[in-house]
Amino acid sequence: MATIAERTAAAAAALERLGAGSISTDPALITKVSSDWSRMSPILQEKVPPGRYLADVVVRPARPEDVPAVLKVAFDHDVPVTPRGAGTGNYGQATPFDGGILLDLRGLDTITVGDGGTVTAGAGARMTAIDRVARAAGRDIWIFPSTKSSTIGGFVGGGSAGTGTIEKGTTSDGCVVAATVAPMDGSGETVTVRGEELIPYIHTYGVTGVLVDVEIRTDPARDWTAVYAAFPSYASLVAVHRSLLDLPRLPRLASADEPALVPTLPASVALDPQLHSLRVIAEASTVDELTDRIRGGGGEVVAVLADYTETDRLSGMSYNHPVWFLQRSRPERSFFHMETSGAPLWDDPDAVRAVYPGPVHLHLELFKHGPGAMVVAGYRGEEAVLAGVPELEAMGIGVHSPHQWYVDRHVELAIETARRTDPKGLLNPGKLTATPPVDTRVNIGVR
Ligand SMILES: Cc1cc2nc3c(=O)[nH]c(=O)nc-3n(C[C@H](O)[C@H](O)[C@H](O)COP(=O)(O)OP(=O)(O)OC[C@H]3O[C@@H](n4cnc5c(N)ncnc54)[C@H](O)[C@@H]3O)c2cc1C
């Protein structure tokens, strides 16, 4: 049998004849798009460094109908296909382990606001552009990640949470209304998937089908305000952070950092590196109540900025971003992070920090049911990182490890669905298994 590279070359020639998207074998492009942001994990830096796993060809569809056409040709030639948006996924989940076609979906970037207030976007549309169009139509999209320049296909296919999550949960909690999906079953067609049937297509890294477009829910637009506050102690910070869950309207985002993470935050106002930082995207009508609580709790209101772009800046300092800013500022040191959730992050931070040799830093986020945190520490090897997981769990902390690339949400359902939608196992190979060789438990609770 021909090698994957030979089969891919034959498929590429067939696609060229069909005119289904642009095709590139440029080595520099292939190297670039065969990698993602897995470099944030020192473990993945070793396991999936750029250049180790390379696609044979990059195919960039220009029209929605190109996607099923590409999958049909790939199916007929037994060629693996790995879908990719902006490549900001940080688990290595867009790495083309078996080579083949890297399907670059960024050309599918149409955005339409529907009569019912939903927004339908091509898989490659950027969340920034979708939010811009939605806001111009007087709507708020439910959730977007801190990597706002990422694509909707990548966010639904590989992301999870972000600005909006406090109220709306994750991408699995109703923000997706419907999706047009191209299966890898030789049909050369697409199907529309809605409601509960969407579950195996969300956060499953494209292993069940390629999202061609996605329809998402919106709400009437609200006035959002960026509020910066500073606190003298972790306890005073936490007292206000936890109180945000009973503000009259939930905030869109509430990120907090210990002083060690503050100097590298690209804030639009000066932040005191001695103090704990709280940054809230608050509904305008709740700002007075919020600032009263900050002052009443011994904190200082650093700035109240009503411009929507300022709220975007706060989004850009949330979730994994403070970890990345720290990593970027100290290239000589290797930091790792663990994604966690649970009340001990508020109540017993010293016990959490004690799990790893110090110094250990906490970046907090707020979920509907309590806090989440990136626990950040110096890297001392994979074994030491993973040894912390049971210790965190023993104290009631939910953990999601960002150091592995296996589908870890609705795995059984994804396997059952893929049997039908990808019978040859050609979609994003190596990501879907019932028996991953590493710890992929997910009990972070945010789902
Ligand atoms: C600093 C930093 C901060 C981050 N913050 C957040 C955050 O706040 N919230 C969050 O959820 N994530 C976050 N992420 C992870 C990631 O940036 C987001 O999930 C992002 O939305 C992924 O979109 P993308 O276009 O870059 O996807 P990609 O990285 O290109 O792809 C992600 C996954 O989806 C698959 N995929 C891509 N397109 C499709 C498609 N059309 N159909 C099917 N599968 C597809 C890919 O194969 C891959 O498995 C962060 C990452 C970094 C590095």
Image (cartoon, rainbow, N blue to C red):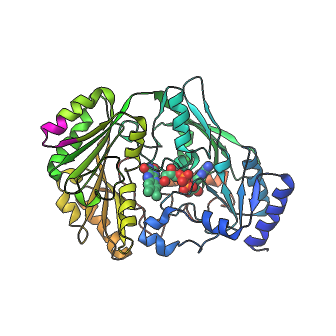
Q: Vertically, is 54 above or below 294?
A: below
Nearest the viewer among 323 and 3 is: 323
Percent of width and height locating residue 148: 49, 47
Tag count in the figure? 0
Frontmost residue, 446 versus 362: 362
Residue 203 visible in the current orientation: no
Residue positioned 26% across, 36% down in the render: 245
Residue 68 in the image: state x and y as whole percent: 74, 48
Give me the residue at 49% from left, 65% from top. 38
**Magenta run includes residue 294:** yes
Q: Is residue 346 above or below residue 163?
A: below
Seen in the image, is 269 located left or right of residue 108?
left
Q: Could you say which quadrant of the image residue 14 lies in?
A: bottom right
Quadrant assignment, res 41: bottom left
Residue 345 horizontal side relative to residue 442, left or right: left
- 155 and 437: which is toward the camera: 155
Please identify the quadrant where the N terminus is shown. Answer: bottom right
Residue nearest the viewer, comparing 442 with 280: 280
Q: Residue at x 75, y 48 (%)?
A: 66
Residue sitting farthest toward the top: 115
In the picture, measured across the screen, residue 309 lies left or right of residue 205, that is: left
User: Residue 200: where, in percent of width, then height?
Assistant: 55, 47
Residue 101 visible in the displayed image: yes
Magenta part of the protein: which range?
293-301
Above or below 138: residue 166? below
Q: Residue at x 37, y 32 (%)?
A: 224
Q: Does the magenta stretch include residue 440?
A: no
Q: Is residue 416 left or right of residue 68?
A: left
Q: In the image, residue 296 lies at what x, y percent?
A: 13, 37
